[in-house]
Amino acid sequence: MPGGIDPHTHFELEMMGAKCADDFYKGTRAAVAGGTTCVIDFVLPQKGQSLLEAYNNWREKADGKVCCDYGLHVGVTWWSPAVKKEMQQLTSEQYGVNSFKMFMAYKDAWMLDDYDLYCAMETCAELKALPQVHAENGHIIARNTEKLLAKGVTGPEGHQLSRDEEVEAEAVNRACAGAPLYIVHMMSKSAVRALQLARTRQRHALIGETLAATVGTDGTHYGNACFRHAAAHVLSPPLRPDPSTPQAMCEALADDHLQLIGSDNCTFHEKDKQLGKGNFSKIPNGVNGVEDRMAILWQKAVNTGIMDPCRFVAVTSSNAAKVFNIWPQKGRIAVNSDADIVVWDPKLERTISAANHKQAVDFNIFEGQHVVGSPQYVVVNGRVCLDDGELRVVEGFGKFLKTPVESPLIYDGHQSQEEAPHRPEFLEAPVRVTNGTPSPDLGLMNKSVESLSVSGCSTPTGRKMREPGQRNLQTSTFSISKEIEGLDTKTSVRVRNPPGGKSSGLW
Ligand SMILES: NC(=O)NCCC(=O)O
Ligand SMILES: [Zn+2]
């Protein structure tokens, strides 16, 4: 399959008085170990800092260290005409940025008020860049935090209590007033429902991302009596205590209600999490995930029959490539695409543990989870960097990847508010299709299913359980080594809808 693309990492980020444990070397090394061959990290300027200066700092930190290709989103953490001008510069060929992230939370730090948020989103639309938001109501969180601390709730459980699902869903709803829009780390069923509702009234592309953390664990850990354990799970928005959340998020990914899964890898050692002992609002926010993202989703969604392998490729790789306009260079296996390839062994079993993970951080939120399915070989730009389980990355081997504006997925077929007084037909509800042959009542198969989806990111084979008599992709007898050795007369397999998108080519 095409190498994974993690659209959301934070390596070497300094926040809340601490520095992330994973730097660009260890972070991308861990990514490759898990089957991810490209990451998109966030430049996050301080309030008042030049965006260009922050971008240059990030390039300096990353360029010599990355083991795989990487791109950059840039945070808009304050607003002024100078910021607007720098956004324009950043989208030029020279800098290669096509996405900007705004925070509706982190009051008194990165948060923008609604006016500034709207200005930034408008600017993105003018530049044909993609606005991203961290959707949580920062004012409600700040007030709830004051009240909880006053009542003596100081432990990590206060983090979740200060920002329940409605705090997230309210912000999703508010952000969807202007578009197109990409909502990062959607963590709750309520937030996904708010996004679905917005799609019924929106004319623009609305893209939803969730996290490996959301799919792989839950908010019950905040109640753990051990501060180290509970604090290690603190991220924003928080994991949800509703135990049905992980499965619901897998289903949302399978059904194209969400389009991507990232990691939001933002790791802090225990000593840094201790900054919040006695005041949960000071616990540095962030968890691991860049290494385990693919295996966790495979385990929770593919092995359970919620999602088939083609949709897995879409949500872990090709949709990110399409959204950020680097497809088909990335996210697809084809002639002229980058040779970022994963040979996935669906039978490989392992138990996730901080004791043997490749990340720098001293904790793993998926500790003890048994997963079946992991990469056996990972090829990064033509170089075998995971060789039958042996990691052979090269520091500095990766390159900076420019992301050009005007992503066809975001801007083609989607009209501006002024241009489109009526909702275009293609934004109607997604069509469910069965794997392989269309159901008799789905004569729609002859049309382009992709063009009928809400997001443009649906996968034609994206569906749930296999139907009786259908071929089990997990137990395929197709053998790559046979193909290579020429023992089989076939030298390639032509399929209608390969992982990574429809094509007349080979994969
Ligand atoms: N998500 C999180 O808790 N930490 C990273 C910063 C952010 O993305 O909000
Ligand atoms: Zn983040």
Image (cartoon, rainbow, N blue to C red):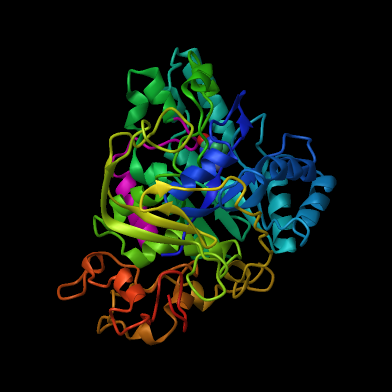
Q: Is residue 382 above or below residue 352?
A: below
- Range of residues picked out in magenta: 234-256
Q: Residue furthest left?
A: 468
Q: Nearer the viewer, residue 329 or 47?
A: 329
Q: Residue at x 62, y 45 (%)?
A: 42
Q: Position of residue 252 (x, y in %)?
A: 37, 56
Residue 165 x/y as whole percent: 43, 40
Residue 167 higher or lower than 478, as above or below: above
Horizontally, is 53 left or right of 250 in the view? right
Question: In what quadrant does ligand 1 lie?
Answer: top right
Say which quadrant the C terminus sits in.
bottom left
Q: Quadrant of the N terminus?
A: bottom left
Where residue 168 sits: x, y (%)? Answer: 49, 42
Residue 360 shows in this picture: yes
- Residue 136 appears anywhere in the view: no
Question: On the image, which quarter does residue 302 sit in?
Answer: bottom left
Question: Magenta span has 250?
Answer: yes
Residue beneath the point at 21% across and 66% down? 475
Looking at the image, which is closer to me, 480 or 227?
A: 480
From the viewer's perspective, is 380 left or right of 98?
left
Residue pictured at 48% horizontal, 64% vertical: 318
53 or 444, nearer to the observer? 53
* Magenta-drawn stretch contains 382: no
Q: Nearer the viewer, residue 312 or 495?
A: 495
Instruction: Tell me residue 495's x, y (percent).
Output: 37, 80
Q: Tell whether 122 sits left or right of 247.
A: right
